[in-house]
Structures are given as C-alpha cells and as structure tokens.
Image: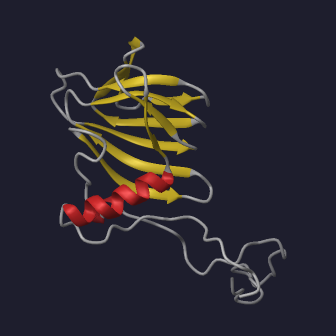
Amino acid sequence: MNFPGPIRTSSGALLPFVALPQTEILTVNVNGTPLIRDALGSGVHFQPLRLDVEAGVWLVLATFSPGAVIPLHYHTGIAEVYTLSGKWYYLEYPEQPQTAGSYLFEPAASTHTFVCPESNSEDTVILVRVEGANVNFSEDGSYHSILDAAALRYLTEELAKAQGLGPVDFISGGTAENALK
C-alpha cells in the first residue's frame, strides 16, 4: 500500500499516524447496479453492495418475488436485515412477520427458513448484512451449500455474464498483499 504522505484535516492539522490514508470514499449507487435475477433460486434476486472476502462480510440489497423462499440455513456469524418494502417471515416464527421499517438482528448460530408469502402484492426488498456464511440445507436436512462473500462474488461475476449485465460494481473490501512488494 502506498501512503500519500501526511494527512491533514480541513484546517491543516496533521491527523494521528494511526489514521488510514484514504484518497477517495468507497461508494456504490444501487440505481446503477443491475439486479442479478434468480441468483439463489426462483424469485430471489440481489444487488451486491459489499462483498469482502477477506473480512468475511457481505452486504446486499435483496429483492424477493411473492412466494420466494430461501431454504433452511444456519448462520456462522451475525446477520442484520432491514426491510424496505413488502413482507416476509421465518417459517419457524410465522407470528413475527417483518414488514417495511422492520430491523432484525440475528445472532450467530441462528437457523431458519426465509419465506415471502405468495399473497404479497409487491416484491419484498431487504438490506442484508452478514458476517460469515450461511450453511444451506436441503429439504431432507442434508448439507446443500455455503453462501458467503466469496460465493456471492463468484455468483455476481458468473450470473452477470450469463444475464448480459456487464461488469457489476461493488465494494470488495481490503486486498491482501505482500508489504515488501
């Protein structure tokens, strides 16, 4: 990493040495990010915002068609979900539906099945931030797959090509490098 020299505040004061040099802010506007359709099953679409493989963190804007389901999965880390529109619930907790304005915190080791009711009259849109991975299971309870930042990055690149979307912008996090190079 090349350091640009001393960093100063707008008044000219030097920032402490521990301040990370930053030459630009990292930003993505979802209005310019294509929706990757049917990425995790029928009616499950997403726009990647941050896919940080090194930190094991991913942040996506997910859109679910009425009736869409994410099968039973186990979270290795915390997950946070903010509902922007529509309605969804966990199959295991149907009495606690999430609607526009709901914020949900999931501790690590939580297990559940995500369901959008078929009766929804609109798509459900949620902002999801996950630390770690989802370990996904099949209907019979057997292991199916892992969904983490690396898998989402791969899906983003491959499905964007297959769907003719072109390159998709997202924040990728840090990049490991040899400090002597």
Residue 75 x/y as whole percent: 54, 33
The vertical placement of 168 against 116, above or below, is: below
Residue drawn at (61%, 67%) of the image:
174
- Please tell me whether residue 129 is drawn above or below residue 169 in the rendered image: above
Q: Residue at the location (41% across, 53% down)?
A: 152
Question: Which residue is more in the foreground, 123 or 79?
Answer: 79
Instruction: Residue 15 in the image: state x and y as whole percent.
Output: 80, 76
Q: Camera-side residue: 22 or 147?
A: 147
Query: How many numbered marks have been drawn onto this rendered protein structure?
Result: 0
* Relative horizontal placement of residue 172, taking residue 35 as reference (left or right): right
Q: Position of residue 58 (x, y in %)?
A: 50, 51
Q: Is residue 133 above or below residue 102?
A: below
Q: Quadrant of the N terminus?
A: bottom right
Is 121 positioned to the left or the right of 46 in the image?
left
Residue 131 location in percent, x, y? 58, 44
Q: Is residue 71 left or right of residue 68?
A: right
- Viewport quadrant of the C terminus: bottom right
Give the side of residue 53 with respect to residue 127, left or right: right
Residue 125 or 147: which is nearer the viewer? 147
